[in-house]
Image: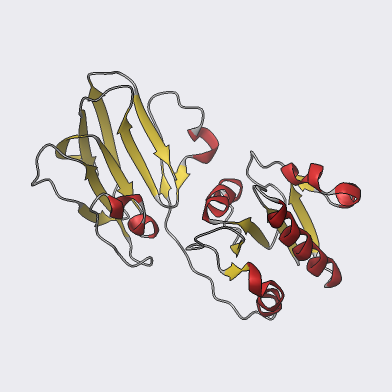
């Protein structure tokens, strides 16, 4: 089996679990492909492994990608998987671990179970984003696992956010911003902004205005087959688009 290994590497502790994972994979004769940012931390082993560019989608054929870190690392790992449908296996060395499957304290047992096929695949919806404005950051990584949020920037004035669903006008949000959440992201930013919690396997998107001027403007759940078109204006011409 060929495994791509991804990590943001924020601590020596994370490196310890990276090395333990590499030792396990080597012992069990699995091929490994490392994200290039780890090369400088590999010491004498640096030339032992092939590497892939952590800023681009993986082009080589691999069976799984192991993400070693926290939920933030796994979210970054999605950017190198893109639309390749490579399954991601999360090893949690961070704090929360909502998205990561295996805790570091059970690393050996978890890897044994994984390679004995004692796991199940879980499919998660992602939002795909495009823009009429030239935003180079969206060209390769225009998708989000948790949510897309539109926020005001450099101003305290509200935004004027016009929304269409499948080409039909929905409403105009006068608010500090708008969150478009996936089911996975419903327990994150959207929930903190008063949005509903939905099951991760639900097939829907959540439109949730941030601090709307009209208090009757509530979150809306729509099918995940819906094409959502957003147009933003405001007192300041600059706005913030975030993909998580």
- Position of residue 136 relative to residue 86, above or below, is above
How is colour applied across the structure in the image?
secondary structure
Q: Quadrant of residue 231?
A: top left
Using residue 175 as the reference point, say whether residue 38 is left or right of it.
right
Q: Residue at x 52, y 40 (%)?
A: 141
Quarter in which the N terminus is drawn: bottom right
Using residue 44 as the reference point, say whether residue 122 is left or right of it.
left
> Can residue 61 be seen from the camera position used here?
no
Between 53 and 8, the residue placed more toward the observer is 8
Q: Residue at x 46, y 27 (%)?
A: 135
Number of on-image labels = 0
Q: Position of residue 66 (x, y in %)?
A: 66, 60
Q: Residue at x 72, y 75 (%)?
A: 108
Q: Position of residue 182 (x, y in %)?
A: 36, 54
Q: Residue at x 22, y 43 (%)?
A: 209
Q: Position of residue 71 (x, y in %)?
A: 52, 56
Q: Quadrant of residue 213?
A: top left
Between 99 and 87, the residue placed more toward the observer is 99
> Can residue 28 be seen from the camera position used here?
yes
Q: Position of residue 37 (x, y in %)?
A: 73, 42
Using residue 204 as the reference point, say whether residue 60 is left or right of it.
right
Using residue 221 as the reference point, say whether residue 56 is left or right of it.
right
């Amino acid at each position: 089996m060929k495994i791509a290994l991804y990590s943001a590497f924020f601590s020596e502790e994370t490196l310890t679990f990276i090395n333990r994972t590499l030792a396990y994979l080597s012992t069990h004769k699995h091929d490994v492909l490392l994200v290039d940012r780890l090369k400088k931390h590999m010491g004498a082993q640096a030339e032992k492994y092939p590497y892939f560019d952590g800023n681009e989608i993986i082009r080589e054929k691999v069976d799984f990608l192991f993400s070693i870190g926290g939920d933030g690392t796994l979210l970054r790992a999605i950017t190198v998987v893109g639309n390749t449908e490579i399954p991601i296996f999360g090893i949690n060395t961070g704090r929360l671990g909502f998205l990561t499957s295996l805790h570091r304290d059970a690393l050996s047992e978890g890897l044994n179970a994984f390679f004995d096929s004692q796991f199940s695949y879980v499919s998660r919806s992602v939002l795909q984003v495009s823009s009429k404005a030239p935003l180079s950051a969206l060209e390769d990584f225009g998708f989000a696992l948790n949510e897309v949020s539109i926020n005001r920037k450099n101003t305290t004035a509200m935004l004027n956010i016009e929304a269409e669903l499948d080409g039909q006008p929905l409403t105009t949000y006068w608010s500090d911003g708008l969150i478009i959440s996936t089911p996975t992201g419903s327990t994150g930013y959207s929930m903190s902004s008063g949005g509903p919690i939905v099951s991760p396997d639900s097939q829907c998107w959540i439109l949730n205005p941030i601090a709307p001027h009209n208090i009757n403007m509530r979150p809306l759940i729509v099918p995940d087959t819906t094409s959502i078109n957003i147009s933003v204006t405001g007192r300041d011409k600059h706005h913030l688009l975030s993909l998580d």
